[in-house]
Image (cartoon, rainbow, N blue to C red):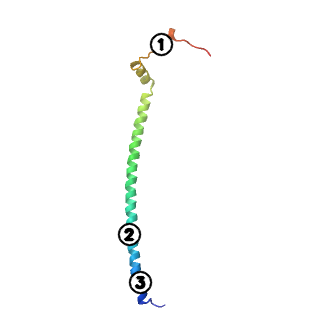
Amino acid sequence: MTLPSDRLLLWLMPLLWLLALGSAAGAIFVKHSAREQFVELERVNRERDRLEIEWGRLQLEQSAWSTHAFVENVARRDLKMYTPAAKQVEVIAP
């Protein structure tokens, strides 16, 4: 087996050095990108949690507003509606 010539080493060493620097720069870039994506993921998770809490509150509000007693109270108070007397009710047969 022959040893590489000095001329080949003069080209090979700087090339390997540049490849090592490029690899290090690539690793740094990938690590930085991963950290940025993790920060974005955490922000999106916080937003999801906030929206889930709001959704739960809205469901509770909807269930409270849809109760018969609430609807009847609003109809009496705001719309001045009342249940008609029995003699005012007319049943229409099909």
Residue 43 at x, y = what percent? 37, 50
Q: Residue at x 37, y 66 (%)?
A: 28
* Mark positioned earlier in the residue sequence (3 or 1): 3
Q: Amino acid at mark 1?
A: Pro
Q: Amino acid at mark 3?
A: Trp
Dot 3 corresponds to which residue? 11
Residue located farthest toward the top when viewing the structure as drawn: 87
Residue 72 lies, with reference to residue 25, above or below; the image says: above
Q: CA distance from mark 2 to mark 3?
A: 21 Å
Badge 1 local density, few (<14 within 10 Å), some, or many (20+)? few
Q: Amino acid at mark 2?
A: Ala
Residue 7: quadrant of the picture? bottom left
Q: Residue at x 39, y 19 (%)?
A: 77
* Mark positioned earlier in the residue sequence (2 or 1): 2
Q: Is label 2 in contact with label 1 (beta carbons under 8 Å)?
A: no
Residue 74 lies, with reference to residue 26, above or below; the image says: above
The circle on residue 84 is: 1
Dot 2 corresponds to which residue? 25
* Mark positioned earlier in the residue sequence (2 or 3): 3
Identify the element where label 1 is drawn: loop
Residue located farthest toward the bottom when viewing the structure as drawn: 2
Identify the element where label 2 is drawn: helix
